[in-house]
Image (cartoon, rainbow, N blue to C red):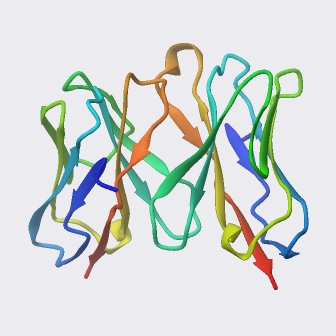
Amino acid sequence: ETGVTQTPRHLVMGMTNKKSLKCEQHLGHNAMYWYKQSAKKPLELMFVYSLEERVENNSVPSRFSPECPNSSHLFLHLHTLQPEDSALYLCASSQERARTQYFGPGTRLLVL
Amino acid sequence: RKEVEQDPGPFNVPEGATVAFNCTYSNSASQSFFWYRQDCRKEPKLLMSVYSSGNEDGRFTAQLNRASQYISLLIRDSKLSDSATYLCAVNGGGNQGGKLIFGQGTELSVKP
């Protein structure tokens, strides 16, 4: 399936590194989302972009910085992360915010 | 009370069994409801949307009970390949209308 793609699929980084996660959707949607999924915990919504404008930021620490240059692309810039930030980071998109969301395969992040 | 709550399971059932999951939600203004399936180390994938009148797709039946604020998923004649975690998602409703809130998931294991 190529509806929503994410790169990289796996990432190991030290606490002083800077990295970026990339998400691209090929579905013509106008809303995109970042979620965090830690082991045995529910999906946590991090950011929502609608028509390229950030409409929600769920009290996410500033070491996570999203960017949405256009309606097809979404980035999550990471810097000075902590080991507790290790998780699966999922991108999703939908046609309008209240509609069905489709997920990318995720980036599995390990912070050492 | 959690906004969306599911039995965590695990549900261990033999092949051919019928199994039902419930998901309760707290916001009476919620309008959209979904069931997702998540395989181990993969992203959630939409299984079915849940409509007011209930809907069926093969062995899967979803129901909505607005009065009691829950949705259900019934799986008949379960297969080994149905083993996964099932997530319910509910849109926030009201001024959170664009936000999907996920339950923590119910794990299903179908045994031979």
How many numbered tags mark residues here?
0
- Residue drawn at x 25%, y 82% is A112
Q: Is residue A9 above or below residue B37?
A: below
Looking at the rendering, in which quadrant would you find the C terminus of chain B? bottom right
Q: Position of residue B8 (x, y in %)?
A: 75, 62
Q: Is residue A31 above or below residue B14?
A: above
Looking at the rendering, in which quadrant would you find the N terminus of chain B? top right
Q: Quadrant of residue A49?
A: top left
Q: Does residue A49 appear in this view?
A: no
Q: Is residue A94 left or right of residue A50?
A: right
Q: Quadrant of residue B108?
A: bottom right
Q: Is residue A102 above or below residue A29?
A: below
- Residue drawn at x 28%, y 53% is A2
Q: Position of residue B61 (x, y in %)?
A: 79, 43
Q: Quadrant of residue B51?
A: top right
Q: Does residue B8 appear in this view?
A: yes
**A24 vs B104, nearest the viewer:** A24
- Residue drawn at x 75%, y 75% is B109
Q: Position of residue A68 (x, y in %)?
A: 15, 36
Q: Position of residue A83 (x, y in %)?
A: 32, 74
- Residue drawn at x 18%, y 74% is A15
Seen as rendered, the residue at the extreme front is B58
Seen as rendered, the residue at the extreme bottom is B112
